[in-house]
Amino acid sequence: MRLTGFDELPVVDRRGTTVGRVSHALFDPARPALVGFEVRLPRLGRLVERQRRYVPLTGVTVHDDRLSLAEGERLQTLRDTRSGISWEHATIWKGMPVRSSSGVGLGEVKDA
């Protein structure tokens, strides 16, 4: 699946209830490996945006139309370390500037 295929994909719990939507695919900062997803929760009263949550790749099953949380998996906060992933340091490739080896700007990452 391409990065754009994850945009706004629903994240559902084991009962099939939507708990949020994917806002970004997150990568390891040191190597080109997908490690998890940033999840945008529904707004409170349709007005107040809530803090983003995170889920490791190992905590979901990826389907064409949704991400399903694994049994017992819960969305994590930014400071949560139980998955061993530093969510603060995870990299978002989409929109990242691309430069040549000599430093000339070539554009930005649109998809991968």
Image (cartoon, grey):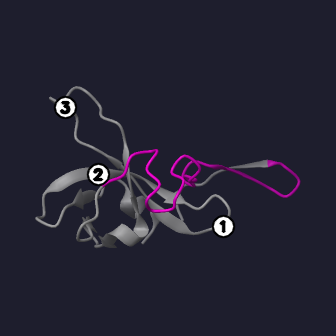
Question: What's the residue at 37%, 55% (across, down)?
Answer: 7
Question: Which is nearer the eye, 110 or 48?
Answer: 48
The residue that label 3 is drawn on is: 44
Residue 81 in the image, given as x and y percentages of width and height: 47, 54
Q: Is residue 96 left or right of residue 40?
A: right
Q: Label 3: how many residues lie within 10 Å, few (<14), some (14-19) or many (20+)? A: few
Q: Earlier in the sequence, mark 3 or mark 2?
A: 2
What type of secondary structure mainly makes up the magenta span?
loop
Question: Which is nearer the eye, 47 or 71?
Answer: 71
Q: Is residue 93 left or right of residue 3?
A: right
Q: Quadrant of residue 36?
A: bottom left
Whole-angstrom CA distance, mark 3 to mark 1, is: 36 Å
Name the kind of residue labelled 1 in the image: Arg
Question: Which is nearer the eye, 80 or 21?
Answer: 80
Which span is picked out in magenta?
75-104
Q: Is residue 66 visible?
A: no
Q: Nearer the viewer, mark 1 or mark 2?
A: 1
Which numbered tag is attached to residue 31? 1
Badge 2 element = strand
Question: What's the residue at 62%, 49% (across, down)?
Answer: 96
Question: What's the residue at 82%, 48% (across, down)?
Answer: 104
Whole-angstrom CA distance, mark 3 to mark 2, is: 14 Å
Whole-angstrom CA distance, mark 1 to mark 2, is: 25 Å
Badge 1 element = loop
Residue 76 within the segment the image draws in magenta: yes
Q: Nearer the viewer, mark 3 or mark 2?
A: 3
Q: Is residue 109 left or right of residue 63?
A: right
Residue 94 in the image, given as x and y percentages of width and height: 54, 53
Q: Earlier in the sequence, mark 1 or mark 2?
A: 2
Name the kind of residue labelled 2 in the image: Arg
Residue 27 in the image, given as x and y percentages of width and height: 55, 60
